[in-house]
Image (cartoon, rainbow, N blue to C red):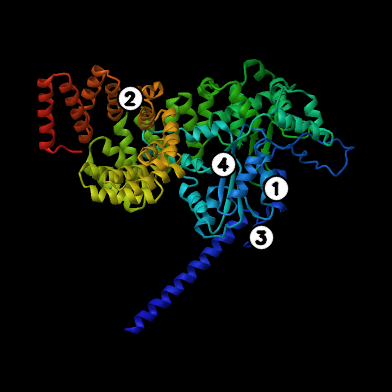
Amino acid sequence: MFTPLLQSGVDRLKSRSEKINADEDAQIETLRGLGGENRSLPLVSEINNRALFGIHPAIPLPAEEASSISPELPIYVPRDIDADLHTGIRSKSEIGGFFLLVGRAASGKTRCAYEAINAVLPEWRLCMPADAKALSSLVTSEFDLSHTVVWLDEIQKFLGPEQLQAEVIRGILMNRNAPTILIGTIWPENYNHLRAPLAETEEEDPNRNARDILNLASRFDISTFSFKELDRARQIAEIDPRIAEVIHRGPSASVTELLAAAPELIHRWIQGENEFGRLLITAAVSARACGIGEEIPVGTLRDIAVALMNGRLRAMASDSWFEEAVHWASRPVRGASSPLAPHSKIIGAVDSYTVSDVLTQYANESAPQRTRSVSDEIWEITLRDTNHTSTLISIFTAAEAAGNTSIAERAATRAAEAGSNHAIWLLSLFLEKLGRNEEALAWILRGAERRDVTSMALAGLQLFKTDRREESEYWLRQAAAAGDANAMGGLGVVLMQRNQFEEALVWTRRSAEKGSFVSMEVLGDLLAQRGERGEATEWFRRAVQHGNRISAQAHLGIQLMGDEETLEEAEGLLRRAAEAGEVRGMVGYGMLLSQRDHESAEARHFLTLAVEAGDEHGMMALGILHAERGETSNAIHLYERASQSNQKAVRNLAIGELMKLLRAQGRDEEAARWELQLDALNGAGADE
């Protein structure tokens, strides 16, 4: 008896030891790419290299100035958000937190973040992952990230369906025994793009993961200098001549943009003396607009420039036009950034060029429809020269936004055929939008048959919409068994429709526990219907705290309405939800206002909006308000509409109130007919 038990114990210890060794090897390998030596990371205060943090180079310091002033970084001008940002970081230093600075290129957001962590957490370790895989590897290898700042400059590079997962970020933030501060930066347009849904339902939306991650962060907006910031800059100008120079140039541009030589960069592109160089910059900006990544291959850059040439330029071009144009466009402007910058994966050769993000953003703002005017020849070049699936997906996104459905479909198809699950999801949704539902379903089933978990979940959801319920349940069960939270939630919905409420509740709970905000709300709703208000309130609160969902705020507010102690909180939640256009919020807020004042015009306004949206609860609430004001005909009309509800409880209430009003008016025959309907309704045991 004891021998196999002993052997089992030895095997477990051996397995555990091998796992520890494997984890340590993974940690060391990952750390090699994060700037640390062996198993350590540098301290925040030890890294002062501007380029490492992604801070734009500044205009040069005059040679005669004292060496006490940093030649790389101008003296920092405190920003208005500093106090709140520093306080936020300090308050989260014991439990961990996530902070995101949103601002345009050269707005100073990266410098602001850099100064914040140096001021508040100088003795914390600094982790600067190159990509999502590096950060995920640290987390999965159980590396100790306690008292570590994770630097996520240009966070959009880390986000996407096959990039950083929301579970990884939640795992970091929820481990309060190892407090970690994540701090990132992003352009406003990238922030808005990643938060925009790509599909009708959240469960099918490829942007959902990125949106979930962004929702976990405390957002700080940073823009051009305020009057207070300009006053601080004038004081610092007495010490730093670079600040003095840009202050004296007046308010025509942001101080930070002037320090980064943004106007000079734009001037070189628009009015520079080298016509071929300007053309090359335009080619680079066009390539980025078409979805090519930051590194534009030399051949692609040259071919797009040739495609942009008119007959005169082609006649003027010498054999060395490209080399001369590149040399001119790569010269730094005032010792700061250059329009183009060479890049290479091997020593001694240039294989690609990057274009200044200042120029990319200027192009987006000055000509937001630029991609719509790109010629088919340029689209063809970008597609022809691309083999990487990530770039093909980026081209798909740009082409779809530009309305070029042919290029979009070809790019997504190539990426899908190359094995990208992300491309399969996007292609399926794209074809569905075009009304090609059978093709869309065929692609997602292709991914499902390859046992891709997300494809299985999406296949189940799409089959559900086409009433192929057995196939839907099969794929949802497969994905749910593999741990997909969306599939668990979808399976819960399928089971509810089959009246298998107990199993539906189990799967919905599992989905909610894995972090699905939608399932948190559904679970809360199910529990509330079962009379378990305490636990329902807890799940709604979790959906509000972690998902920042307007609908969850409405749900939570309604739950809190019945308790005098939480009435003030309920009102705040419902008001925000109502003002955001959430129907439940409109109903709840309207009811609160009407209880306080039957004559409230604001209550009538929100309840009317809910009725116009077709909400039965809004019809009942507004009907009651009309009845109390003696507006009987309006109340009867609303009760009659509500009596057609799919919810038995609402129908019962509507018919009951309707009968009262009719009898009060002496309309007994009509009331009797409604009473027969009520008896039939309850006698038939209609579904809830």
Q: Is residue 688 left or right of residue 354?
A: left
Label 4, secondary structure: give it. helix
- Of the two numbered discs 1 and 3 on the same chain, state the one appearing first in sequence: 3
- Of the two numbered discs 3 and 2 on the same chain, state the one appearing first in sequence: 3
Q: Are marks 4 and 1 in contact (CB under 8 Å)?
A: no
Question: What is the C-alpha distance between the residues marked 4 and 1?
Answer: 22 Å
Q: Are marks 1 and 3 in contact (CB under 8 Å)?
A: no
Q: Residue type at mark 3: give it.
A: Glu
Label 1, secondary structure: give it. helix
- Of the two numbered discs 3 and 4 on the same chain, state the one appearing first in sequence: 3
Label 2, secondary structure: give it. loop
Task: Report which residue position mark 4 lands on.
Answer: 155
- Of the two numbered discs 2 and 1 on the same chain, state the one appearing first in sequence: 1
Q: Residue at x 74, y 29 (%)?
A: 230
Where does residue 670 sit, x and y in percent of width and height? Answer: 12, 21
Would you place residue 362 above or below residue 545 in this image?
above
- Of the two numbered discs 4 and 1 on the same chain, state the one appearing first in sequence: 1
Task: Report which residue position mark 1 lands on.
Answer: 119
Task: Tell me the tag on residue 616.
Answer: none
Q: Quadrant of the N terminus?
A: bottom left
Task: Tell me the tag on residue 37.
Answer: 3
Question: What is the C-alpha distance between the residues marked 3 and 4?
Answer: 25 Å
Q: Nearer the viewer, mark 1 or mark 3?
A: 1
